[in-house]
Amino acid sequence: MAKTATQREREYAGLRAAREYKNYINGRWVASSSGKTFENRNPADSEDLIGTFQESNADDLHAAVDAAHHAFNPWRLTPAPRRGEFLYRVGEVLRRDKEKIAREMTREMGKVLAETRGDVQEAIDMAYLMAGEGRRLFGVTTPSELPNKFNMAVRMPLGVAGLITPWNFPIAIPAWKSMAALICGNTVVIKPASLTPLSVIMLAEAFEEAGLPAGVFNVVTGGGREVGEPMLKHPKIAVISFTGSTEVGREISVACAPQFKHVHLEMGGKNIIMVMEDADLDLAVDGALWGAFGTAGQRCTAASRIVVHRKVHDQFVEKLAARTRKLRVGNGLDPNVDMGPNISASQIKTVEKYVKIGKDEGATVVAGGSALTNGPYAKGHFHEPTIFAGVKPDMRIAQEEIFGPVTSIMQCNSVEEAIAIGNGVKYGLSSSIYTRDVNKAFLAMRDMYTGIFYVNAPTIGAEVHLPFGGTKQTGNGHREAGVAGIDVFSEWKSIYVDYSGSLQRAQIDTE
Ligand code: UN1
């Protein structure tokens, strides 16, 4: 059934009227010199226009980098605890407006309200964490090998940070990156995903209200080719931090190499839940449902693979399929909905392509399997939550990132086999085990080569004060969040202070 006008009104009540949004450069809201804008529409309802956004070009990007470069020195010299106070105030603004921002984000990105509230909360958590970090930013002091000499290592900022952020965590990830960059004393230019620019604009509004000095935080909306690429080449950008696909990450890495720009990449995942024969099965089913279909499977950390011990396999599949069939799909603003739309028509095409691949490879669909296109779904990008069983570890659906509501169930005979299957992909972001056997839990904890590991919990649910990121083709050796996030946005300077009054030669005058 098509939505009635009143249903629509109720869903969008209290939300912003569509208008033209500007770039945020040097503390001012400015139009692109291109004179062009692009539209952003609700993925659950294409009739709902969120707004129009600047279709920026390289000139706009250059203006933002100039502003950020100009603002760098005074910001760098602002004491870090003072910088932290700005972040604290941003956290307070986000906390006050959490509900409003979450509703706008659901409308822009699609995921259900509970999840967009969580997304804003993750930004608030990061604001408070990095505000506190302003009074730490710990370095190292250590004895010298020579007498009357003092050794230490301190962190210094890099300069202008270029941040390229994704649509699946539209405020949390821009907050992770920008707040870590800012507390270290860098200034930032963000290019948000074109599918979720409003969320980053709302973050910029919070920075503006917090009174951040002009030029310290800048937002330029627009395409990857027009805004992203000039960022990679700009000599005044010292570090790029990117979250997105492995393919784009590779291009970024190559483009940054000639200038030896620092690059931090957070890319794909093919995360696994391992369910052992002694697991609390209902708990594992709860976790699998949330891990696989939370955010409609559009998390880097989504549980897109599940391997189950053969002794409990059939029972697990049956329970998970039954629960999955009951999930209510629809507009994320509707409180009765469990799973929202996918972000775009092209994402749905990808999901459909993989469902076909899975069937052709001989796996069996035990729940879902189709896009939803009729009645209330006609104007959005919806797909049923889908489970494949009978999956073999080398099938494409068990190897490649789908980024949609599809999970693949495999069988194993032991924890060792589960670990081998778990590690048998090119990604290494997140993994988890359900077991009541402490020995199995510790074995998997040691041997899973992923950046994140959970025991008796799904593959999603990272907290901001621990490192976030992955091994192999998920990342390039860096992490964000926690203290590890500080490492991306700072450089070490080792300092030796010789107060002996004479020449002392390291390694030579030590005997
Ligand atoms: C992502 O999927 O890109 O652990 C980020 C989680 C969230 C963050 C996910 N806290 O799933």
Image (cartoon, rainbow, N blue to C red):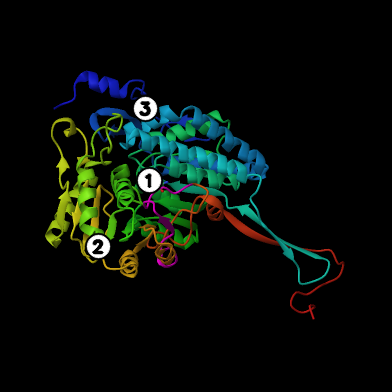
* Mark 1: few/some/many CA within 10 Å (<14, 14-19, 20+): many
* Mark 3: few/some/many CA within 10 Å (<14, 14-19, 20+): some
Quadrant of the image for the C terminus? bottom right
Q: Quadrant of residue 253?
A: bottom left
Report the residue at 57% width, 34% height from top.
214
**217 versus 491 height, above or below:** above
* Residue with the mark numbered 1: 166
Q: Are marks 1 and 3 in contact (CB under 8 Å)?
A: no
What label does residue 20 carry, if any?
3
* Residue with the mark numbered 2: 311
Q: Earlier in the sequence, mark 1 or mark 3?
A: 3
Query: Mark 3 against mark 2, which lies toward the viewer?
Result: 2
Q: Position of residue 195 (x, y in %)?
A: 32, 39
User: Among all residues in the image, which is located at the extreme right?
Assistant: 501
Query: Mark 1 against mark 3, which lies toward the viewer?
Result: 1
* Mark 2: few/some/many CA within 10 Å (<14, 14-19, 20+): some
Amino acid carrying label 2: it is Lys
Q: Earlier in the sequence, mark 2 or mark 1?
A: 1
Report the residue at 27% width, 20% height from top.
9
- Does residue 350 show up? no
Report the residue at 37% width, 33% height from top.
105
Q: CA distance from mark 3 to mark 2?
A: 58 Å
- The region drawn magenta spans 445-463
